[in-house]
Image (tube, grey):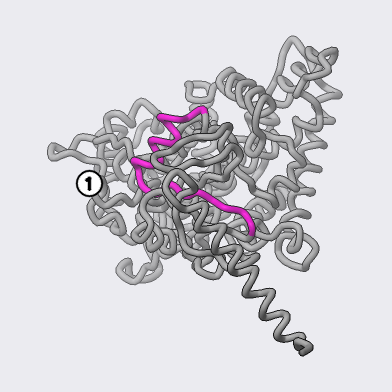
Amino acid sequence: MILSGVTVLGLLFFLSSLLVFLSWRRGSGRGKLPPGPVPLPLIGNILQLNLKNIPESFLKIAKEYGPVFTVQMGVEKVIVLYGYKAVKEALIDHGDKFADRGSMPLLEFVNEGYGIGLTNGERWKQMRRFTLMTLRNFGMGKRRIEERIQVEAQNVIEELKKTKGLPCDPGFIFGCAPCNVICSILFHKHFSYKDQKFLCLLKLLHENVKILSSPWIQVYNSFPSLVHHLPGSHNRLIKNFQVLRKFILEEVEEHQRTLDPSNPRDFIDCFLIKIEEEKEQPQSEFSIESLVPTATDLFTAGTETITNTLKYGFLILLKYPEVTGKIQEEIDCVIGQNRIPCIEDRSKMPYTNAVLHEILRYTDITPLGIPRALTEDIQFREYFIPKGATILPFLNSVLYDEQEFPNPEKFDPSHFLDESGNFKKSDYFIPFQTGKRICIGESLARMEIFLLFTTILQNFTLKSVIDPKDIDTTAVANGLSRIPPFYEVCFLPL
């Protein structure tokens, strides 16, 4: 009897499903890969996840399979670490083995194997060591960079005064400040808030974050060889990165023409000097090909993370005017109106410090975390995980831990205050990640956030255009980054 085409396809589907199921069973037992939901042929578990709210999906899986589980995105198995204990055990206790960057196909295509964010091995070690040293030499975490942020904060105040207390979208101004801070470090430049090139770059950065946080990019990263050739927003992102890299390359070429090796002005100068020092070393990782993606990584991360935190943070302050009032009382008591805020004020302002920590916890700007990969085989708990396996330390599960932060879905500054009203640290506070791959600009980000928030609230009262009770703080995107909804606010001078 001749089988029909439909029958043959049905048999093939059944056999492939059986093979996948058996493979999954073999990889899910004791001493094997961690357990997880049964994947479908070719597409894995992607249909079992809510790509618009992966944290919610992972919570359900963790309840069924425990704090270490496997999900399959396309053909790639991903080991998810859920909760503080699992994340700490991996990234801190076994930090060296969990130190590689996991696969992110779209960004890998854009960076062509260079940069600091996605590289591994000796290339990553050299880029990170050099970048940290250079950023510190240019004042990261010190008085020198603090003064730059203070100047930029005053520029923000002047721009906000121009709104004359009328409703405005603060996103643009909030983007200008951190962008100019990182530009001063990378290029030794300051842009006018009306500079057209500057405005174009800000637009591209904002668009890129929206695209990277969309469900479509989850699909791309699950099926890169297929989706790459299809129409979609990934094509727009690739073009945007080409524009950004062209801008960086133009800055590099200008620096090459004006370089004084005895007097480096910024990060690019230092990198060019390093290239010259190692030009006779065939194994050197320092070249123009590596400089441009590295500077692009720093430029992007140094702008959008702070911008989103400011946008989200002030939306929350609009919703909770009583919190804003307490911060301003503390500002009046510690700083007053006759001088600008400085980083030393932070230790004397426990409530403000607690609010800013709670903003970073509650908003959880990078809810999925950034994937890691194993540098070698490991027996992790009762499971065997092979070298190169993709690991996802799920930061949201740590920042929203119910035992450490009661009612984590509620914005509550008391999460970081003791019974006496003193600031209380928490090991669960890891919005900048932890371990070997902790954010290289954490100290800079913390400084910017404190100085910008306090300077703005020292000068303005916030007024919502709608009843604060009606403000919705639900993110409009919840992927690589969490993006706040659009809103308007009136900045009323004090």
Identify residue for label 1.
414
Part of the protein shown in magenta: 75-96
Depth check: give the residue in front, 238 or 9. Answer: 9
Single out the residue that lies furthest toward the left: 420
Picture coordinates of residue 275 (x, y %)? 79, 19
> Left of 429 or right of it: where is 391?
right
What residue type is disc 1 on? Ser
The part of the image, by quadrant, that contains residue 111 is: top right
Residue 85 colored in magenta in the image: yes
Count the marks: how many?
A: 1
Q: Residue at x 39, y 35 (%)?
A: 89
Can residue 161 be seen here? The reply is no
Q: Quadrant of residue 135?
A: top right
Image location (x, y in percent) of residue 173: 55, 50
Mark 1: few/some/many CA within 10 Å (<14, 14-19, 20+): some
- Up the image or down, 40 lies above or below 201; here it is below
